Image: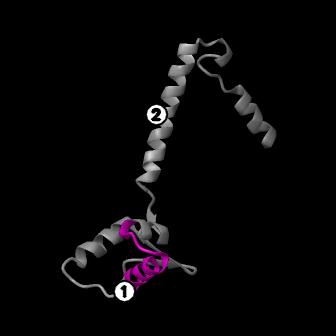
Amino acid sequence: MEENLIDKVKGLKCENNYATMSKESLIERCQSQDNIFKQLIDNIKLNNSAMLCKSDIMQIYHCESNKALKILKVMFNMGYGSKIGKEYYASKQSHDAFIKDMAGKEVFI
């Protein structure tokens, strides 16, 4: 299987061979690839993941690890989160629902 994968990679053909491309073409190609990577990095920074974990809660609420864990536990106990093993998680939708439902109320952590 590994040999088959290597053959597929060797079989990939680029529009142009990098060795024969002009300096300007190489720079343009690199810039276009950089733009693709920048978009991917921006998506990661926006945290388009499906679940929020303790580190995400720490970043959202600008708090320490202990308080983020307590927030996730409260969300879990109120039915807004999930517990997988020893870790607590909440989806973005359930977090948004939690914030909307708790608007104007005091949440004791």
| Residue 84 percent location from the top left of the image | 54, 77
State the CA–CA distance, disc 2 to disc 1: 42 Å
Seen in the picture, residue 80 relative to 31 is either above or below; the reply is below
**What's the residue at 48%, 68% (across, down)?**
55
Q: Quadrant of residue 16?
A: top right
Which residue is the extreme one toward the right?
3
Q: Quadrant of residue 14?
A: top right
Seen in the picture, residue 15 relative to 68 is either above or below; the reply is above
- Residue 109, numbered label: 1
Seen in the picture, residue 87 relative to 2 is either above or below; the reply is below
Pointer 2 or 1: first along the chain:
2
Q: How many marks?
A: 2
Front residue of 93/54: it is: 54
- Residue 2, numbered label: none
| Residue 68 percent location from the top left of the image | 43, 76
Seen in the picture, residue 85 relative to 35 is either above or below; the reply is below
What residue range appears in magenta? 60-77
**Residue 61 magenta:** yes
Position of the N terminus, as image quadrant, is top right
Which residue is the extreme one toward the left?
104
| Residue 102 percent location from the top left of the image | 24, 79
| Residue 73 percent location from the top left of the image | 43, 83
Label 2 or label 1, whichever lies nearer to me, is 1
| Residue at the spot of label 2 | 35
Name the chief secondary structure element in magenta.
Answer: helix
**Residue 66 magenta:** yes
Tag 2–tag 1 contact (CB < 8 Å): no
Q: Amino acid at mark 2?
A: Asn
For the residue carrying disc 2, how many other residues have a C-alpha within 10 Å: few (<14), some (14-19), or many (20+)? Answer: few
